Image: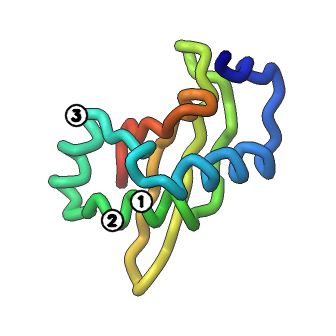
Amino acid sequence: MAEVIPLKLSKSRALSVIRELAADTSKIVIVPHGHKRAGQRSITRRQIELCCQKGTIVEGPFLNVKGHWQTNLYRRAAGEEVTCAVVIDWATRLVVITVY
């Protein structure tokens, strides 16, 4: 049985869940809008994966309108900055909505 979505989620707990899921890159799903924005901004899948694996939370976590926990992750490496809006599909995967 799947885990129950918590009613409260701290930044540290959200970050540990995100890092645990992002360790397996097949659990990082990018929606079409995210692919489109990544292409427009020359952001690669690898940069998105690293943002999820090593980034810091700059906004959230908060419950979005669909009842999922959402956060913005930021990572700066080699002079490049990447921010990903990520939804935690609880205990199964990370859904990247957009990147900038």
Residue pictured at 30% horizontal, 34% vertical:
31
Q: Secondary structure at mark 2?
A: helix
Residue for badge 1: 49
Crowd around label 2: few <14 · some 14–19 · many ≥20 (10 Å)? few
* Res 78 label: none
Which amino acid type is shown beneath numbered disc 2? Arg
For label 3, count other residues whose C-alpha is less than 10 Å away and answer few (under 14), some (14-19) or many (20+): few
Which quadrant holds residue 61? top right
Q: Amino acid at mark 1?
A: Glu
10 Å neighbourhood of mark 1: few (<14), some, or many (≥20)?
many
Q: CA distance from mark 3 to mark 2?
A: 16 Å
Callout 3 touching callout 2 (CB < 8 Å)? no
Tell me which label, 3 or 2, sits earlier in the chain: 3
Residue at horizontal 41%, vertical 86%?
Answer: 78
Residue occupying the point 42% across, 63% down: 82
Q: Which residue is mark 2?
A: 46
Decide which of 65, 29 is in the foreground and name it: 29
Q: Pointer 2 and pointer 1: residues touching (CB < 8 Å)?
A: yes
Element assignment for label 3: helix
